Image: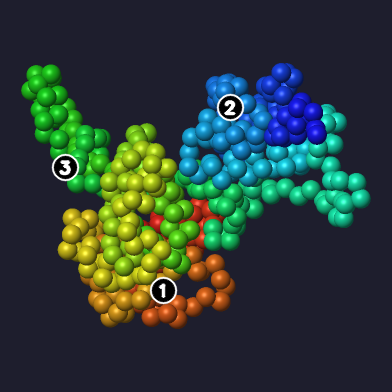
Amino acid sequence: MMPADQRDTAARPQQVSLLGDARSGKLSGNLSAFGRALRRAGVPVDAARIALAQQALQCVGVARKQDVGAALETVLVSREQDRAVFREMFAAFFRDPELAHQLLARMMPRSEREAGPPRARPRVQAALAPPAGAPGTAKPDLELDAAMTASDVIRLKSADFNQMSASEYFLVQRLVRDVALPLPTVASRRTRAGTRGSRIHWGRTLRAAAHNGGDVMALHRLRRRRQPLPLLALVDVSGSMERYARTLLAFLHAATRHVQVGGRILPVCRNVFAFGTELTDLGPAFRLADTDAMLQAAGGLIHDYAGGTRLGDCLASLWRGHARCLVGRRTVVLIVTDGLDTGDPDDLARELGRLKLRTRRILWLNPLLRFDGYTPSARGAAVLHRMADAMLAVHNVSRLQDLAGAIATLVKQ
């Protein structure tokens, strides 16, 4: 029979090594290091959250790795897209001390890297070392995913959205929110006082004359105000466009919220719709200020996500229910789709023709243009190629940065 104290020791779960014992004095330091790693990976972590994490670990204890991970995720993660990043970072941090040290060495400033990684405690090395004589004891080379460190920004900007890992995709979703879209301006119907203009501002002119004894000393003018170019965005949410659609929606929400015109910050007149087998108005979701909240609300509004594509039927629904978006010929239409339409091409051609008559230009944003030998051989793609005024590839961040120039060139035509 095993003594009682030995039985209790054997039954006790293994301690989480890298966090250390709460009484050893290393809990705070390791939590700070883990918080630094998360912050460099793009997760918003501050000193208040680290203090809250320490209190959470004091409540749940550090005896079980699952409890530690759940407690830290609860207090350190506040956004849904950061959960996958946190879990990968947590797994890397607790899988191997050498891997954790290499990860931190990549993330810390140069002065900290030159000092070398901290030495692991002997008990940690002994606990993580393979049994003596066990097969496959040779230690493989440690490799880190560069996307987790958010250091290879140039590579991420040129990487295809559809060929990224989960962690890279979440990082790129944050990158696209910082891409600027300086829209060109157009003259609005409203006027304002100015030194030049085709019309005389009689009110200001007569008021000035009253101060000069009735003598008109100058003719004040009225000029038309400038406003950002109105946009109508139609985003394909079919199965082949799943990743592109989510990224483009995040980009459009952040980049078209407002624009600076003449030193003033003006809102952009934008109408965004998702289409697949049916048309969905994303206006209520786009009125939310936070991009993450917008994506969550859009997911609740779209009922045909990752389905088929019937652009012709969706354009007919646009005419029936949202004709107000097509008033005037100043609006530029952005159609985000790969052109793999399953509807009748004749219906699509007819609806696109109606759209061209009531809008300024149609710009086709096609992720398949990333292939050098791409030709619009599909029936829907052939109709779009014939009816659109221009095409642009939108498969990575660099192409999204070219969108503003493409719109400005299209407007000048």
Disc 2 residue type (three-letter): Val
Q: Position of residue 401 (x, y in %)?
A: 50, 52
Which tag, 1 or 2, sits closer to the chain's start? 2
Residue at (85%, 36%) from the top-left corner?
126
Q: Quadrant of residue 386?
A: bottom left
Which tag, 3 or 2, sits closer to the chain's start? 2
Q: Quadrant of residue 119?
A: top right
Give how far apart the Cα atoms at labels 1 and 2 are.
52 Å
Left or right of 335 on screen, residue 96: right
Q: Secondary structure at mark 2?
A: helix
Name the residue tied to disc 1: 340
Q: Position of residue 191 (x, y in %)?
A: 20, 40
Disc 3 residue type (three-letter): Arg
Give how far apart the Cα atoms at labels 3 and 2 are.
74 Å
Give how far apart the Cα atoms at labels 1 and 3 are.
51 Å
- Image disc number at residue 199: 3
Name the residue tied to disc 2: 60
Q: Nearer the viewer, residue 153 or 401?
A: 153
Q: Are marks 1 and 2 in contact (CB under 8 Å)?
A: no
Q: Are marks 1 and 3 in contact (CB under 8 Å)?
A: no
Disc number lying in front (1 or 2): 2
Q: Secondary structure at mark 1?
A: loop
